[in-house]
Amino acid sequence: MDFKILTSELLVEFTLRAKDSPIPKLDKISKQELPVDYFQFYKSVSSVYSSKIEEEDIDFDSYFKHRFMQVKFRGDYTKKADDLFEAYQFIDSNSLNLENVKKAHAMISANLLPIDQQGLIRSTPMFVLNSNDQIEYVAASPSSIPEELAHLFHDIEILQKQRLNAYEVFYYSALIHLVFVKIHPFLDGNGRTARLIEKWFLTEQFGQKATAIQLEKNYFTNLKAYYNNIKKIGLEYERLDYKKSLDFLLMTILSLDLQIKPI
């Protein structure tokens, strides 16, 4: 495939490491019975755990009561998870493209950023800091973001026109997540948006049953590995090495065995 930013270089090794086909596992997950709406439940789980990765003060038990039992909490306790939930609803009926990602980001960032920054590509440098306030990562320069995003969504469009096997779907969905978060195109909400995009691509390829792929919960459960695997490919955008991304790319597909059991 004539990619501009994605790569198929690790696909063979990815497939060998993943071993068993993910389709039977996905089918088992999608057949689980729940006492509430299946898709609403799993979107709630996604919203909570993607929020928790960003250290939001929210737990699933409380959010479940809020969403399904009409239990009242402080408005500021649930609002950011509610914003994410709206974005997960949005991906069901909208194609994965740059304009729709901007719209989804506007939903996600409704309580993160001023209204004039919601869904807007940043025009300032971006440095990701660690817990010691040291620079952990230097994102794409503002001047390069439009071209880098154009390359990424050019490649996504190529994939959308292909007949991909299940291994390819998981491989490219994770790689799209990684490339997007490394570009870091927004002032805030990049991680939440990147995880949403991974789920978005999976949903376009597998249909709504992909809603139950709990990549967000898996990333939270393995948070140290999640961040370390993102860091492995480099600390500056101009020097990234995607040959070192295999451990990150495998995280979702290898988590399916654990997800067969009900949450």
Image (cartoon, rainbow, N blue to C red):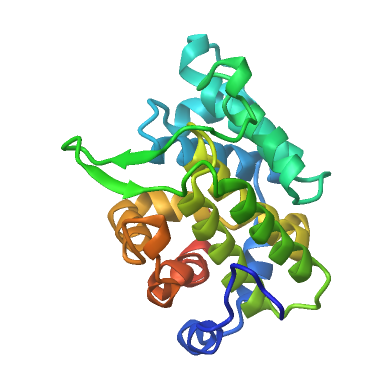
Q: Position of residue 62 (x, y in %)?
A: 47, 25
Does residue 204 appear to the left or right of 72 in the view shown? right
Q: Position of residue 228 (x, y in %)?
A: 29, 59
Please, is residue 203 above or below residue 81 in the view? Answer: below
Q: Which residue is farthest front?
A: 143
Please, is residue 54 above or below residue 227 in the view? Answer: above
In depth, the one of 64 and 95 nearer the eye is 95
Q: Is residue 73 visible?
A: no
Q: Position of residue 75 (x, y in %)?
A: 52, 10
Q: Is residue 186 visible?
A: yes
Q: Position of residue 46 (x, y in %)?
A: 55, 43
Please, is residue 263 above or below residue 121 in the view? Answer: below
Numbered disc total: 0
Occupied quadrant, residue 86: top right
In depth, the one of 184 and 205 nearer the eye is 184
Task: Tell me what residue is drawn at x 57 percent, y 26 percent.
Answer: 109
Does residue 101 appear to the left or right of 17 in the view shown? right
